Each structure stands twice: as C-alpha cells, then as structure tokens.
Amino acid sequence: MNNPAHRPLKYKSVEEIKKVIDEYFNWCNNRLVKIWDDKKQVELMVCSPAPYTMSGLARRLGLSRQGLLDYSNRDEFLDTIKEARERVHEDVETRLMERQATGAIFNLKNNFGWKDETKVDNEVTLKGEPSRIVIDTKSTE
C-alpha cells in the first residue's frame, strides 16, 4: 500500500511499533504517583495503574489518533494495531463495570462505536384511519 502523503513511515516494521505499544501498556500498568502521608509527614511513590486510552497510545507512539488509525489501514500493521485497540477497549469496558462510568461511556461511544438508542412507537387515529408514527432517536453525546 502506498503512503498517500508520500512521507516516510515512522515505523517501518511490526516489531518496531509493537515494542513501543508494549512499552505504553507496561507504563500504564506500573505508573507511579506521588502521595503525601500525613501520619509520617513524607511523600511516597505508589503504583497507580493508568487507564489505557487510544490518545495515550497514539501519543506514546508519536502519532495523532488519526495517524494511529492510518497504520491500522496498512495490511502489515493491521493485526498489531487491532490487538492494541482491543486491549484499550477491554480496559475501558472493565472500568465502566467497576466504577468510572461517565468517562468510560464517553470513551466507548467515541472510540469504539457504542451508542445510545431510543425508539418511540406510537399509534394514532386520524379521521378514522389508524396511522403509525415511529420516532427513532440516537444520542449524539
């Protein structure tokens, strides 16, 4: 597949991009944050895993979100990007089920095609003849 912008690819091989993807997930899993311990009056470093995000993954790769998606359109990178995307999807869905619903729902709608749908089905009679009105609305949040 040709590079439509005629720019050289940042990642030339699956192994090269996979290495950075793995580094991103490893960083998320082992993120350290500083907390203050009032009792001991000392600052501590504790492990606080970061949520996986498509934007975070793209940034770690040095790409825009769209750039990351463009790599998934290249046959040689398709499976690697798809696997990473599914890891992010699983993490977001897990967090939704655990506690962080609002942000997770937003993420699932915007990155993974989830949507809210409401369908209203009413039957009315106009001048003796039944008519059916169906209103189908979809959330745009």
Image: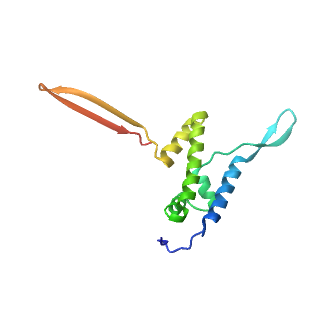
Q: Quadrant of residue 93?
A: top right
Residue 140 in which image quadrant: top left
Q: 21 left or right of 78? A: right
> At x 58% / y 62%, what residue is drawn?
63
Q: Quadrant of the C terminus?
A: top left
Frontmost residue, 103 versus 84: 84
Indicate the colouring scheme: rainbow
Measured from the top left, where is residue 3 in percent x and y? 49, 71
Tell me which residue sits at (58%, 43%) in the image.
92
User: Left or right: where does residue 138 sit relative to residue 66?
Assistant: left
The picture quadrant where one finds residue 123 is top left
Task: Name the residue nearer the viewer: 118 or 23.
Answer: 23
Residue 132 x/y as whole percent: 22, 31
137, above or below 130, in the image? below
Image coordinates for residue 83, horizontal then vertical, percent? 57, 53
Q: Position of residue 124 (x, y in %)?
A: 21, 26
Residue at figure coordinates x 32%, y 31% from the top left: 120
